Every structure is written in structure tokens, then in C-alpha cells.
Image (cartoon, rainbow, N blue to C red):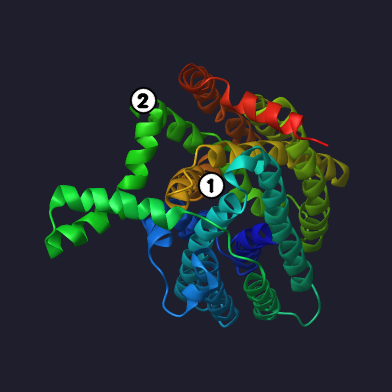
Amino acid sequence: MLGFASGFPWALIGSTLSAWLFDAGLTRTAIGALGSITMLYALNFLWAPLLDRVRLPALHRLGQRRAWIVLMQAGLLVATLLLSLTDPRVSVFWIAAAGLLLACASSTQDVAIDAYRIEIIRVEESHRLTAASAMTTAGWWTGFGLPGGLALVLADLPGWEWSHVYQTLALIVVGLILFTLWIPEPESNRDIEQRKDETRMREALGPTPAGQRTAWLLVTALQPIAEFIRRNGLSLALAILGFIVLFKIGEAFMGRMAIVFYREIGFSNTDVGMVSKFMGWGTMLVFTLLGGLLNVRFGIFRGLLIGGIAMASTNLLFALLALTGPQMWLFVVAVIADNFTTALSTVTFVAFISYLTSRVYTASQYALMASLGNLSRTTLAAGSGMMVDGLGGNWALFFVLTTIMVLPSLILLLWIRRALTERLGDVFGRARVVAKQQSP
């Protein structure tokens, strides 16, 4: 359900908004550029340390993680209702403003949810992080796929405006808030360890009020990064972050323009909703859970390598669809293949950065890595529409280029595996052995 809460906002400002803007007559370049409001997902690491350290007034009684989740879901509700009151044919500005609020609340909610997911798994059960990643990813695709498909189908109903669609989706946010109020808060010794770091920093800076404030700021903003670099070494840390940025760049470019591509070659909103969303959700759910099982058995690095190659290769099916036109059978095959490879690679990717995250600065470190992973599908992919226009609308060539984009990340992956093995041993291999030994 928390994975659902993370994926749901992408249905609001992703495929649903793209279809709305397309119906309103905006150009491909404008749709792609307006999607750049999602760059906040790539920047949320800047304020993520606050979620590790700041206790919210009144709401802190819910616990550190749940308090932040509930506050951000309230922001999602306001933003969704604001979107229902706008019209892109009248003013794109208000669409962008409401979308910006939604992206801000959603990206901050993601930080709290990811920290919750890691901390709810006890340290001695860390081998279960891969399974937890699979469940979260299945929830994410459910939150993205089902509401997104519902929105596209509702938009085609007689008498339904896009404002009615967004008002309907706002009811889902209300349900998510009630669910968050119901779940338990994870147990953690995070506060104790953070106070130890702050005490050492205060001793180094002196007992003055200015020194104490500086100590709090340094521990909040810099200690998570310093701990990550100290634990991995500078060169390995930079290589890990570089891989995270590049791994899904091809998928990001393809995903940003997918709805526009489907509509432009002749599929209706209902066609896209039934195949890409409803059927896509069902296959993605199954493949995500299957991907979790495969990763538990074969390991993180092998899953990333196989998943990366397969994920990029399936883009060639969309290149073929661009050449043949709106063939429903090929559309179905392409979506199923894309969902399988995306599920496999995403589960492994989430587990990979979860294993590399400290339990003391969970929100800060995971947000940094997740934000860099989102950089490709948010900020960098904002130029996807311009890229298609620059290719003269040649969709086939566009999808071929997105296939090639994966190669740099796979080269980095091979280097990271050697470096981590030399430094830590086959850490992910040991996790698999523990999981097997503890199976009933």
C-alpha cells in the first residue's frame, strides 16, 4: 500500500496529465517540457535530511516516518483538487503550479516511505530487503497503473471532463491518508546514534550556542554523505552514484513520450488505458513478484546486468510498432515484454540501493541515491519531446537510440561489482545464502 502511495502521484502528473495536455492541443515539446516539474524527484535529497532529524509539531505523535507521510499526503490532496479546477486551454501556468505542488509533496512522501520500508525490516532480517523491494515495486506499479488506466477510460466517457477525473482520483488520496494513520511506526535506534554524532561534533566545535547550532546543521546535512563516502571510499561511491544516474535513462526517455506515441500512431485513450494501464498493471504485478523471486535466487548484480540488457532491448519492439502502425497484437506483446524487463530491473535496482543505505541516516542516503535514479526520468527526460521533434517525428529511430543509452551504465556496473567484491566480499551472495538457510 505504501508502494501504491508512491506510484499514485505519477498517474496524476504522468500519463494522465500527458493525455489531458494532448487533448488540449499542446505540442510534443510543450508536453515534454511541462513534465520537467517532476525534476523535484531528482532534488528531494536536498531536504531529505530534515525527515531524519526534524520532528513535526503535533504530528510527531504518529512517529517520525508516519508523521511526514501523512503531512505530504495532505499536500497531495490539495494539489489534486487544484488540478481539477484548472484548464490547460485557458492557462498552462496554473497546471504547472498545481503540478509543482503535487510533485513537491509526492517526492517528499517518497523519502519518508522509502525510509519506512527499510526500517520496518530489522537489521538481522536484512536478507528480506529484496522481497520487500518487490512488494513495494508491485505496489508502485499498482498505484501508477490502475488509477492511470481508470483516468484514461473515464476521460472518454460521455459528459466526463478531465476536472471530473481528477476529483475522482482525489478520493484515492483520502483512502491513503486513512491507511497511513492505521499502520505501525518502525522501531529504530536512529535518534540515539544521531545524538552521538552530534555530541562529537559539538565537542569539536565548542560549547557555544553558535557551535551547537552548527553541529546540528553539519550532522543533518553532511554526516549522511560523509558516512556513505567513508564506508565505500570516494572512487567507489562516485561510481555507484554514476551507475544509478545512467541505469534507467533509456527507459526514462521512452516512458516520457509513451502516451504521446500511442495516441499519435492511432490508439485511443481507451486502447491505451486497457492495454498499457489495466493489462500492463496485471502483468507488471505478476512480473514484479516473479522478479523478486529471481533476484533472491540469482543475486543483485546478476539481476541488474540481465535486467538492464533486457529492459533496453524491449524498446526495439516499440520501434517495430512505430514502423507497422497501430497493430493491437504487437502493442500487447510490446507492453508485456516491457513490463517484464522493467519489473525485473526495478526490483533489483530498489534492492541494490536499499542494501547500500545506512540505518542511521536512512532517509538522507536513500533519497540521494533514489533522486539520482530519478534524474534520468525527470530532468534529463524532459528533452524527450524535443528529441522526437529533432528526429522529424521518427519514432522508430527514437526507440533505437533509447536502447543504446543503457551501455554506459552496464560498463559501470561491471566495475562496481569488482570494487565491492574486493572491498566487502560477495556481500550480496552472502545475503542470498542467509536467506536460503533461514527458509523453512
Q: Amino acid at mark 1?
A: Arg
Q: Is residue 393 visible?
A: no
Vertical arrangement, residue 108 with respect to residue 343, above or below: below
Q: Amino acid at mark 2?
A: Ser
Residues 243 and 159: in front is 243
User: Seen from this angle, which residue lies furthest right?
Assistant: 329
Mark carried by residue 235: 2
Residue 39 is left or right of residue 77, and the answer is left
Q: CA distance from mark 2 to mark 1?
A: 25 Å
Residue 286 is left or right of residue 371, and the answer is right
Q: Earlier in the sequence, mark 2 or mark 1?
A: 2
Residue 257 is left or right of residue 211, and the answer is right
Please report the residue visible at 64 percent of the width from the left and 36 percent of the height from the top.
348
Residues 170 and 125: in front is 125
Instruction: Quarter of the image for the C terminus: give it.
Output: top right
Mark carried by residue 377: 1
Estimate the x, y position of residue 74 in percent, counting from the top left.
54, 77
Quarter location, residue 176: bottom right
Residues 185 and 97: in front is 185
Which of the two discs, 2 and 1, sits closer to the camera?
A: 2
Vertical arrangement, residue 70 with respect to residue 432, above or below: below
**Label 2 CA crowd tier, 10 Å (few <14, some 14–19, many 20+):** few
Vertical arrangement, residue 431 with respect to residue 38, above or below: above
Estimate the x, y position of residue 57 in percent, counting from the top left.
41, 78
Please report the residue visible at 38 percent of the width from the left and 56 percent of the height from the top.
49
Estimate the x, y position of residue 175 in percent, counting from the top left.
69, 75
Residues 253 and 183: in front is 183
Q: Is residue 56 visible?
A: yes
- Say which element carries label 2: helix
- Say which element carries label 1: helix
